[in-house]
Image: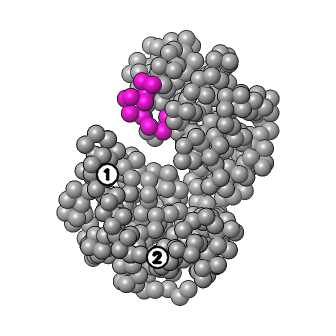
Amino acid sequence: MLWLYNIGIQLYGLTVWLFSVFNTKASFFINGRKDIFQKIKKNIRSSDRAVWFHFASLGEFEQGRPVLEKLHVKFPGKKIVITFFSPSGYEVRKNYPLASGIFYLPLDTPSNAKKLIEAFNPEIAIFTKYEYWYHYFKVLNDKRIPLFIISGIFRADQVFFKWYGGLNRKILSFVNHFFVQNETSVQLLKTIGIERVSLSGDTRFDRVAENVLTQKKLDLVADFCGSSPVFIAGSTWREDERLIHGLAELHPDWKFIIAPHEVDQNHIKDIQTLFSEAITYSILKEAGMMIETKQSQTLIIDNIGMLSALYAYGTISYIGGGFGVGIHNTLEAAAFGIPVIFGPKYDKFQEAKDLIALGAAKSIDNQAALNEAFEAFKAHQKSAGKIAKKYVADKKGSTDQIISYLMPYLASSLPCQQAPQ
């Protein structure tokens, strides 16, 4: 099966290369990997023995960030290197100050894995939530470099637990320890003979709770909101935006803030076509208080990086993605004590299920359902918001558990040896 895996990697690379001619993300993916090993050599010395963090994308970075930052506090002299698979992570966080180097992860081939790990020569490697790469994991294992998965989550329908998933199970066998989000994941891993597992929860709870304590003030947003109740729609896609437009027409006394998942010019124009009176944040920022925001019901956030701070100004939130591959981050809103609404595809997200069960979230699949959910939360916003906030507060602590486990691997300045399991 390994030969099929290798062919699949090559085909993936070829497909992205073909799309890069007319697709911005694909272009970033290809261009960001050009001369990657020369870039690494200029910035990283293998003798430094850095700690390697890998993140699939921006969401996984925010998820693993509490562990990275606490590790930096505990071991300020240790260097950190970061890799991203997706442009949406790398392009936003390529200047993150705590890392000695931030790079795209080359495609998972035997030669790339060997060259990258020899260049980094990491003490340990930490991958967040998912991305299981055969060659990278094998080389780490061969070189006796400990590998950890944090905030992992597993489902019975994944290939690891199928009769034909032998290669995928082999990949998991290279991991030294799994820190997983729920008991289901613990039990599933045990069914395939993996016992090196800790139920630690999700580090995102630590991250979003910290975000509330260190929230950024957004004066222009506050001025736009005024004294009106505010509906914050985060990480939206076109289907989400059409439904939100229908809701906005019914509630002219509310302010609506839309922070789309994609902020390319065409998408922003599509939103402006829907919300003809809307203003964009870039225009608001350029003109400052000279714009009379009271005449606009809708503010479009046409940049990346503001969303987590926006929820501080919200009354009810909507999280996009539920009509596509799956919803985005609900916890950022919940941490600020805001009830959450999202589309129908949320089954892969334990926190979404929990918030629904507690009465702090609702899933919708059409305009009427959105309108109904809105009315329900408008009537019980404070009580639902308190439940959401408490849910986040009660789930904190994953980061400290993970750091405590990692301490023996990092406490010595000597070359890292395999710690006992």
Determine the residue positioned at 69% across, 37% down. 364
Residue at numbered disc 1: 16
What residue span does the magenta drawing correspond to? 260-270
Secondary structure under tag 1 reads helix
Residue at numbered disc 2: 167
Amino acid, disc 1: Val
| Residue 263 lies in the magenta stretch | yes
Snapshot quadrant of residue 180: bottom right
Determine the residue positioned at 48% across, 39% down. 261
As drawn, 253 above or below 47? above
Q: Residues within 10 Å of mark 2 (few under 14, many from 20)?
A: some
| Residue 225 lies in the magenta stretch | no
Report whether 205 appears left or right of 273: right
As drawn, 319 above or below 278? below
Q: Residues within 10 Å of mark 1 (few under 14, many from 20)?
A: some
Report whether 147 appears left or right of 154: left
> Marks 2 and 1, Cα distance to the nearest angstrom?
24 Å
Q: Position of residue 255 (x, y in %)?
A: 61, 22
- Residue sticking out furthest to the bottom: 420
As drawn, 252 above or below 384? above
Q: Quadrant of the C terminus?
A: bottom right
Amino acid, disc 2: Leu
